[in-house]
Amino acid sequence: MEKFVLVIHVITCLLLMAVILMQSSKGDGLSGSAAFGGIGDGGAFRGREAVNFLQKSTMILAGLFLVTSLTLAFLSSTSRIETTDSVLQENLGTTQSTDQPAEAPGEGK
């Protein structure tokens, strides 16, 4: 389940970056560019259509990003609860039980 949500999260991130980069700060976005085979005003998106589409896409993808982020955080917290000891505690426990105390110089002979 966690891997599936992670794949959806990465795809959402990439799409969100693409949609944000297609937007222009001047408000012309895809309407006046030759992106996606469009030439001037004859492109796939014109005027308000491009702005509305990009704004709606950004809002939907941002919402999906939020949901997948929260889901991944919840899944990772529940998987950590199932473990009894931390990795550090496990390593400390094994090294203390297997290591013999070092003798001080000159005591053994």
Image (cartoon, rainbow, N blue to C red):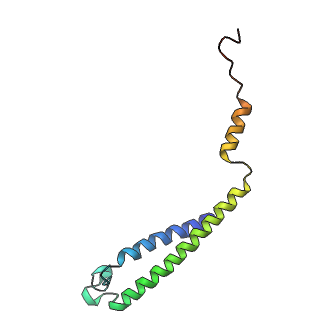
Residue at image location 67% in from the left, 17% down from the top: 104
Q: Position of residue 56 (x, y in %)?
A: 46, 85
Q: Nearer the viewer, residue 90 or 9?
A: 90
Q: Nearer the viewer, residue 104 or 31?
A: 104
Outermost residue toward the left?
40
| Quadrant assignment, res 46 | bottom left
Q: Position of residue 28 (x, y in %)?
A: 30, 84
Outermost residue toward the top?
109
Viewer can see residue 1: no
Viewer can see residue 67: yes
Residue at image location 72% in from the left, 48% down from the top: 85
Q: Is residue 103 above or below residue 98?
A: above
Whether residue 101 sits left or right of residue 48 in the image: it is: right
Whether residue 40 sits left or right of residue 109 in the image: it is: left
Q: Position of residue 109 (x, y in %)?
A: 70, 8
Q: Position of residue 37 (x, y in %)?
A: 30, 82
Q: How many marks?
A: 0
Whether residue 79 sits left or right of residue 17 in the image: it is: right
Q: Nearer the viewer, residue 104 or 86?
A: 104
Query: In which quadrant of the rendered image does the N terminus lie?
Result: bottom right
Q: Is residue 26 above or below residue 65?
A: below
Residue at image location 55% in from the left, 73% down from the top: 66
Q: Is residue 60 above or below residue 14?
A: below
